[in-house]
Image: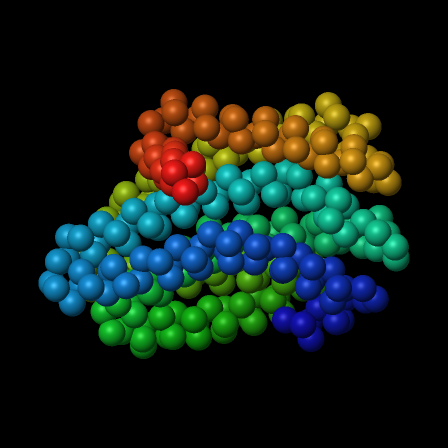
Amino acid sequence: MTALASSQGEGAISSYTIAFALLTIPVGVIGVPLGVVIFPSISREHALGATAAYVGMVTRSVRLLIFVMVPIAALGIALRSPVVELLFGYGKFDAASIERTAATFALFLLGLPAHASIAILARAFYARQDTRTPVAAAVLAVAVNTALGITFVGPLGLPGLALAIASAAWIEAGVLLVALGRRVPTFELPAIGRVLAESAVGAAAAAFVAALTASALGLLLEPGAPKASILAGTTMATLAGGATYVAVAIALRIPELPSIVGLVTDQIRRRRGS
């Protein structure tokens, strides 16, 4: 992909690298650590033959990641320009660089829930002493990524490479989900599809409200505005979008919301106790 990015003119590799680095933040902070944490537990449950417990842990983890990552992706897409401007709008990183990086970042974010879910799904197979399936899915994703990258880079430019990576991530996650469903008939695929659909509804509403708020705060978020103003405006838009997502989650009775509230409450109690 870097070779294809280099064909997109001066500064393209920098924009591609920055956009991809932003994508890896939520995956590295939330997705991968969760996969590492649950791996010993799902390995133990599978070794003991406790299929129900194994399936429950994997399903809950994937659902939780989807519930969290879908709104992060949506809000990131809605606020892509001020986020990039705030973090990287310095020196020679001009308005054109910000626009190109923001567009690339937005399409990278389309694959965020899939990237995070793969961190769990791959370990679900490792817990079964099956390394071949995740590797095969990853190889397929690389092939799809390359083919789509070559196809998309012409009409879409640098963002087309991000779209190719996002598409390949969803294909890899889909292959792992279907394969796990075949290996473990009790695996709750419909439950994962349901939370994805419900989260998408809430995330769409959140992105709309965030974009509307950002538009209303246009003077704060316009390119070249003081960084403090961009930070304040982006924070307000994010809070407005986040509140909207929570409201929709409550209305739809998405069970992951109480789970997250419980986790946060437990962490607060532990810190106070220590």
Residue at 69%, 50% in the rendered image: 103
Q: Residue at x 12, y 64 (%)?
A: 48
Percent across and percent down for residue 152 are 63, 62
Figure quadrant of the C terminus: top left
Q: Residue at x 38, y 38 (%)?
A: 273
Label count reads: 0
The picture quadrant where one finds residue 248 is top left
Which quadrant holds residue 47? bottom left
State the colouring used for the structure image. rainbow
Q: Is residue 104 above or below residue 145?
A: above
Q: In this image, 89 relative to 195: left or right?
A: right
Above or below, comparing residue 77 to residue 40 in the picture: above
Q: Position of residue 257 (x, y in %)?
A: 37, 33
Q: Is residue 23 above or below residue 248?
A: below
Along the viewing direction, whichever of 93 and 4 lies nearer the viewer: 93
Taking the image as shown, residue 231 lies to the left or right of residue 183, namely right
Res 41 visible: yes
Q: Position of residue 16 (x, y in %)?
A: 69, 62
Q: Quadrant of residue 226?
A: top right
* Residue at the image position 36 percent from the left and 70 percent from the top: 134
Choose between 274 and 49: the one closer to the eye: 274
In the displayed image of the protein, which residue is found farthest to the front?
A: 274
**Looking at the rendering, in which quadrant would you find the N terminus?**
bottom right
Q: Nearer the viewer, residue 136 or 222?
A: 222
The x and y percentages for residue 199 are 42, 37
Visible in this render: residue 67? no
